[in-house]
Image (spheres, helix red, strand yellow):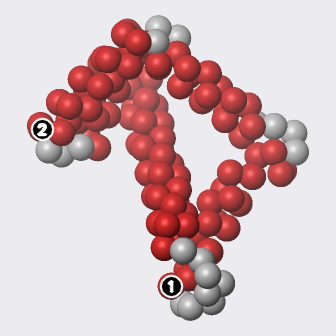
Amino acid sequence: MSWTAAIPLLGQVIERVIPDPEKAAQAKHQLVDMAVKGELDELAQRAGVIKAEAHGDSWLQRSWRPIVMLVFTALIVCRWLGWSAPDLSEAVELKLFSIVQLGIGGYIASRGIEKVADKIRR
């Protein structure tokens, strides 16, 4: 896949996802920088691995990422309800929370890109 051809599409997605024009411009600039540095190719390879997992033969192969996210979310909820180990540090709690935020943000962004890509294909 040619990333130079996909940059305008990704720019449109950025405009829809990030309403602030200044932040959207920064995100587009970072996207172009990533394309120049070849980081988009690496991300495409990672996406290929995830796609292969999602279409795998085993139920566990297809579902391990959502299961991990649910476990981390459950750990956060247990901590908020006071059902966690007393020696669990705040740093560990914040790390779990950032992992869940990253996972949810990645899911939302990927669904948004998927919907926009379907409309453009038609």
Residue 115 makes an appearance in the image: no
> Which label lies toward us, 2 or 1?
1
Q: Of the residues shown, which amino acid type is indicated by label 1?
A: Trp
In the image, residue 77 above or below residue 26 = below
Residue at left 18%, top 45%?
19
Q: Position of residue 90 (x, y in %)?
A: 48, 73
Q: Amino acid at mark 2?
A: Pro
Q: Residue at x 41, y 12 (%)?
A: 37
Neighbour tally class for label 2: few under 14, some 14-19, many 20 plus, Cα within 10 Å: few
Position in image of residue 77 (x %, y %): 55, 80
Indicate left or right for 113 with 58 as reference: left
Q: Earlier in the sequence, mark 2 or mark 1?
A: 2
Q: Residue at x 67, y 35 (%)?
A: 50
Q: Which residue is mark 1?
A: 80
Q: Position of residue 41 (x, y in %)?
A: 52, 16
Mark carried by residue 21: 2
In the picture, residue 87 is in which quadrant?
bottom right
Q: What is the x, y in percent for residue 56?
A: 81, 37
